[in-house]
Image (cartoon, helix red, strand yellow):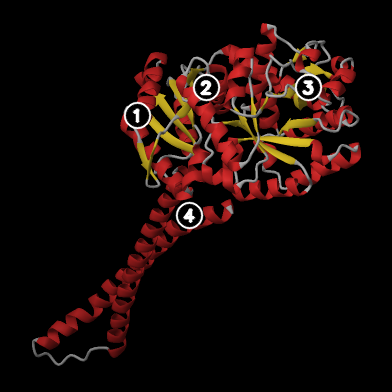
Amino acid sequence: MQAIKSSDQNLAPRSKLLNIIALCGAVVVFVGLSSLLLPPAIARIFGSEVVLDDTLSVALLLNIALILLIWRGSQVLSQQAKVADDAQREIGMVAVKDYATGLRNRPGIVEIIEQKLDAGEPISLINMDLDNFKKINDLYGHQAGDEMLKEVAERLVDVTPEQSACARLGGDEFAVLLFGAAASAENTLAIAEEIQNAFGEPASVGGSITKISASMGIYANVKPGSSIEDVFRRSDIAMYEAKKAGGERISCFEQTMEAEVQKRYKMESDMRDGIPKGEFVPFYQPQYGIRGSNLVGFEVLARWNHPGGELIEPTEFIPLAETTGLISQLSFSVMRQAFVDAKDWDHSLILAVNISPVQLSDPNLDKQIMKILVETGFPAQRLELEITESSLLEDTALVLSTITSLKALGIRISLDDFGTGYSSMTQLKAFPFDRIKIDRSFVFSMLDNDESAAIVKSIASLATALNVPITAEGIESDEMRGYLDEIGSMDGQGWLYGRATSKEELIKLLPQIALVAGGYDLDDLKVVGGSEPADEKRESTDKIAKRASR
């Protein structure tokens, strides 16, 4: 292809040269013929009896026609050359321009970075990723998403200085290259803050007013000799640090971040080795009926028994498992172990298992869970799968289909952390939930915060109207339990009732668990309870891990 392109480029000047040569030759012949025919023709005009040579006359006329033809051909060739040049320029623009926003694209910004690095000019790169952009697409449609991208591009261009270049790298990721005086660390941070302020202004997207927010990573004072890969990788690392901290933040690259990335790579490798070895194990946190103080089941929470002897909390590995595609393998491994553990427990006890939004988007989820149930002999009727509100926005049709398939197997579906996401009455009616779990943040503050108390009461009233059972999470005191008991009949969990414990610890309590399931009072199982502050922290980490994918 390159050879053809090169040949076409050489053909135009060669044709032009041949035309010039031909035209010069035709003009020489014209001059020669004219010198032979012009004198007798003039003499004849003045009355002389001179006979003109007919052959020479025809030759002259043909020569004139040839000159005109060559001239016309030159005009056509010039026009074609101009069109080809314009097309080449257009191709060049397409190669470096993002037509959705009018900004440069990744190759376009790379081209400028290469030029600046080759010239030894100081540069800084701001890499940014829009927060929750997918939700804009899901809520308002892809046209609204395109409007958002254009709005972002316009605001970037408005606030960035002359010594800069803006680009859309792809999807919802943008970059701003700063060079010259604008590339100092202080100026780069100031410009990033200006961008953040510009994004803070409300935007009209899809007929609705929404907010633009972005996680930004800065790699400032790029050293001479740095590669393009270094520039993007380090700004990426900083950007993901901002995103990991909750989004809508600015993070500047530091060498320690690179070490953290290496640590994550090592952890990912250890996880890939550890999952098939059974290093990820289920821990069980009890759930009780608040009014009757009867044990109703357990929530299954993952822990990592690392070969180094450390028991690693889910906040450390769940987000990484989701981003690396290991979450399903990890979840099914823990689920299988839990089913084997609980198969012979009292058959009235439920096992509640968290399902990641990543897993819920898998159309084969129901088949995979059914396979584990069959292989372990655990009854589907004793399984309750907990999904978060954010899962409902990923792909509504697919999620509804998956939930329906799971319920057809006899599995119960619980809406976890209710009140913290985007659920509406329409979604609660559309999705056949068997249980609603009130988020621990509301339960924790309901005794001191009127707004949280009102939310808890409203959720309880809503669930009663829909005839859906409730579980309150994060119950930490008898006062909290008593307050919830006054609101209505519901189940509860939290470190008042018991900490998450391993199978080995639980085995010692199995006889008592069976008795409690049969109706014994909660006080008879005080040994299960965990009223230490450490247990509160443990439960908190479990809940944070469950929300890590939002």
Q: CA distance from mark 2 to mark 3?
A: 33 Å
Marks 3/4: CA–CA distance: 73 Å
- Where on the picture, by quarter, is residue 469? top right
Picture quadrant of residue 87 = bottom left
Q: Earlier in the sequence, mark 1 or mark 4?
A: 4
Percent position of residue 290, x then y: 68, 23
Mark 2 / mark 3, whichever is N-terminal: 2
Q: Residue at x 48, y 26 (%)?
A: 454
What amino acid type is highlighted by mark number 3?
Tyr
Q: Which residue is mark 2?
A: 242
Sequence-first disc among 3 and 1: 1
CB atoms of marks 1 and 4 within 8 Å = no
Q: CA distance from mark 2 to mark 1?
A: 18 Å
Disc 1 designates what residue?
198
Q: Nearer the viewer, residue 508 or 239?
A: 508
Residue 336 as seen in the image, left or right of residue 11: right
Task: Give the residue number, with chain letter if any, for mark 3.
Answer: 284
**Residue 329, relative to residue 536: is it above or below?**
below
Q: Which residue is denoted by mark 4 in the rendering?
A: 9
